[in-house]
Image (cartoon, rainbow, N blue to C red):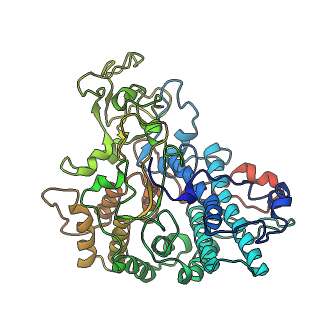
Amino acid sequence: MKNIPSLFKHLAFPVCLLLAPAACTNLEEDLYDRVTPDTFFKTEKDFAAAIGGAYTQLYLLGSHGGYFSVQEISSDEIAVPIRGSDWGNDEWYRAHRHEMMPYDPGVNSAWNNLYAGVLSCNRLIYQFEQLKKEGSGLPANLDAYIAEIRALRALFYYFLLDSFGNVPIVTNFTDDNYIASTIPRAQVFDFVEQELVAVLPLLNKTVDATTYGKMNYYAAKALQAKLYLNAGVYTGTPRLDDCLAACDEIINAGHFALEGQYHDNFRTNNQGSSEFIFAVPFDENFAKGFNLHMMTLHYASQATYNLQQQPWNGYCSLQEFYDMHEDADVRKKNFIAGPQFAADGVTPLLDQAAEPDDPDGPQVNHTPEINTINTGALRQAGVRIGKYEFKSGATPDLDNDMPVFRYADILLTKAEALWRKDNNSTQALDLVNQVRNRAFEPDQPFTTLTAENLLAERGREMFYEGVRRQDQIRFGVYGNPTEFMPGSAPCKELWPIPSTQFLFGANLQQNPCY
């Protein structure tokens, strides 16, 4: 079993919908009516465990059906073809084509998951503030705990800002009469920025096992860098100098470095990666939810990895994205392509239910070409996601940790900010090549940076890390037609606010286009 921070180990707290704060407090009225040092938080471990209740919402990044799924499938990286009777809900077909609907379950799950994280943070901030009023038996670092929770809440709001844009800001846990209202995206940006500025001086700058998987100073700085990189999209006003300043604090601190081998970041025991600024520490026993192998592998691939359960034959990449990778690029191994074999490497995997018109016959052969992502997709078509190590004998839940902010991304973020200020920046070129050269032997550096090769390089390095849609929007190509996406209007860059949220009587306004 992996040694993971105790704050992440199976902590369950009540979760209610954002738009019913009164119900939340009423459900646990005896518990939360009055928080005193005599009944709560007597030790440092109590505080750490309580904070873990908010972090657990991040487990949903590793599973199918919510925020991360919509991010990836609506980009040019991933599709979930409708294969026979499996994956027959056309929600994911529509998501890839930028035709999402307000009633789609994935959109609603994304909203609820993120606001459940916000609500957990609000509850903890309220409880800790109540303890401060009591004024006795408090840990010396209570303000630092509150700052950490506020930074985590800022992360949840950053996800909401990026995907839904115009959303309610809810910070009060106890106001029974509060009615959440949609506020403009630029104001949500201001809120996230102000929260980070307020808490950064109080956040822990230690980088070791005690801060792994927590929103420490550098995790908040990484969030700040990404916020400022996308400020032009979010507010209409670029903040490139602020982005550079945040990146430089991380880089100059000397705590992080590129791993010598790219895929060391994604192996089963990857919690020691020198690139992880902030990661979700999954564990197959105590922190479940990372189901990538189940989501992407063919049914027969159970025999390749001796998996304890049969995979679901869903997620795959697209030919155009796969073809961006040169054969010499180690990141091409992020994909599982070609004929597939059992664990012995010799016995071909056979799919006796393969379609009669499949040109490859019954042997499982993952081709970059996909005949369609609509009804009638071939069961074997599409290269699968192999970025993470799938250990032999894996349960349905992987042990690999999942990066949210990675040092390579910070280097590329700084490079892009420099390039946007000066397209001929040699420093930007050097930073991109620092990341790129790791993937080649011998080095294959760029000689110049363009919008096309910079976006492509970000795609190759950051594949399946939840940033591709954001990158496409920032480079102005998200709505461009691709093989299975006919083209979309700029208003489709935001997701629809789920129709179920309007049932709670909140003063919400639907995003344009929906």
Residue 323 visible in the snapshot:
no
Measuring from the top left, give residue 415's x and y in whole percent: 32, 73
Front position in the image: 265 or 192: 265
Residue 29 is drawn in which quadrant?
bottom right
Q: Which residue is drawn at 43% across and 61% down?
A: 471
Check the image and report above or below for 267 versus 303.
Answer: below
Determine whether 242 is above or below 259 in the image.
below
Q: Quadrant of residue 337?
A: top left
Horizontally, residue 269 falls left or right of residue 82, namely left
Q: Quadrant of residue 132?
A: bottom right
User: Where is residue 325 drawn, in percent x and y?
Assistant: 26, 50
* Left or right position of 85 against 307: right
Outermost residue toward the left in this view: 442
Count of marks placed on residues: 0
Question: Can residue 107 be seen from the camera position used here?
Answer: yes
Depth order, front residue of 488/380: 380
19 versus 78 height, above or below? below
Instruction: Name the residue rendered at 69%, 51% in the picture.
Output: 498
Q: Which residue is drawn at 41% across and 34% down?
A: 297
Q: Nearer the viewer, residue 415 or 293?
A: 293
Above or below: residue 509 compared with residue 395: below
At 26% across and 21% down in the image, what residue appears?
A: 347
Q: Where is residue 397 in the image (x, y as percent from the top left)?
A: 49, 41
Relative to 346, 168 lies left or right: right
Q: Where is residue 37 in the image (x, y as percent from the top left)?
A: 76, 72
Using the image as rendered, state which of residue 117 and residue 161 is in the foreground: 117
Task: Report the side of 13 relative to 400 (left or right).
Answer: right
